[in-house]
Amino acid sequence: MLKIRLRRVGAPKKPSYRVVIARSQAPRDGAFIEIIGHFNPLTDPETFDIDADKAKDWLAKGAQPTETTARLLVKAGIIEKPVPKKEKPVAKKASLAKKKASPTKEKSSPTKEKP
């Protein structure tokens, strides 16, 4: 699967990013197929430059944007706002531990004594 994602470049504590097409298994700063833009979050307002034609072409080929890249693509007007994913509810471990800790009380029937 291909992803449209950010690749970090820049000095320590001064990040700048390239928008790249990469395999989903590749490391963040590893191998990529093509650079289609760049993003600088440190400017006010943040700078985002992208080749819209290339982005639309890769989206048509099935490349999936990451959450951050999707936000930037929506802001640039390349895609519409994506539908948020619903997360599965997670059972609280504290309530499960509480249930295990409190033993159930069994009612004892009166025992008959033998004469």
Image: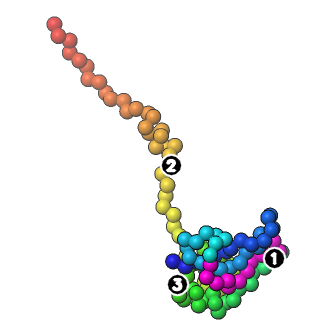
Give the residue type that dot 2 points to. Lys
- Determine the residue positioned at 61% across, 85% down: 79
Disc 1 and disc 3 in contact, CB within 8 angstroms: no
User: Which mark is nearer the camera, 1 or 3?
Assistant: 3
Residue 27 percent across, percent down from the top left: 61, 69
Disc 1 and disc 2 in contact, CB within 8 angstroms: no
Q: Residue furthest right?
A: 44
Disc 3 and disc 2 in contact, CB within 8 angstroms: no
User: Which mark is nearer the camera, 3 or 2?
Assistant: 3
Tell me the tag on residue 26: none
* Quarter holding residue 101: top left
Residues rendered magenta in the picture: 32-43
Q: Residue furthest front?
A: 31
Out of 62 and 90, give the one closest to the viewer: 62
Q: Is residue 65 visible?
A: no
Say whether residue 67 is magenta: no
Q: Residue furthest bottom?
A: 53
Mark 1 or 2, nearer chain start? 1
Q: Is residue 58 visible?
A: yes
Give the residue type that dot 1 points to. Pro
Residue 78 percent across, percent down from the top left: 64, 87
SS for dot 2: loop
Judge from the rendering whether residue 13 lies leftward or rightward of residue 75; answer left or right: right
Q: Which residue is mark 1?
A: 45
Q: Which residue is mark 3?
A: 62
Mark 1 or 3, nearer chain start? 1
Question: How far is the residue under mark 3 from the one under mark 2?
Answer: 37 Å
Residue 66 percent across, percent down from the top left: 60, 74
Out of 107 and 37, give the one closest to the viewer: 37
Tell me the tag on residue 92: 2
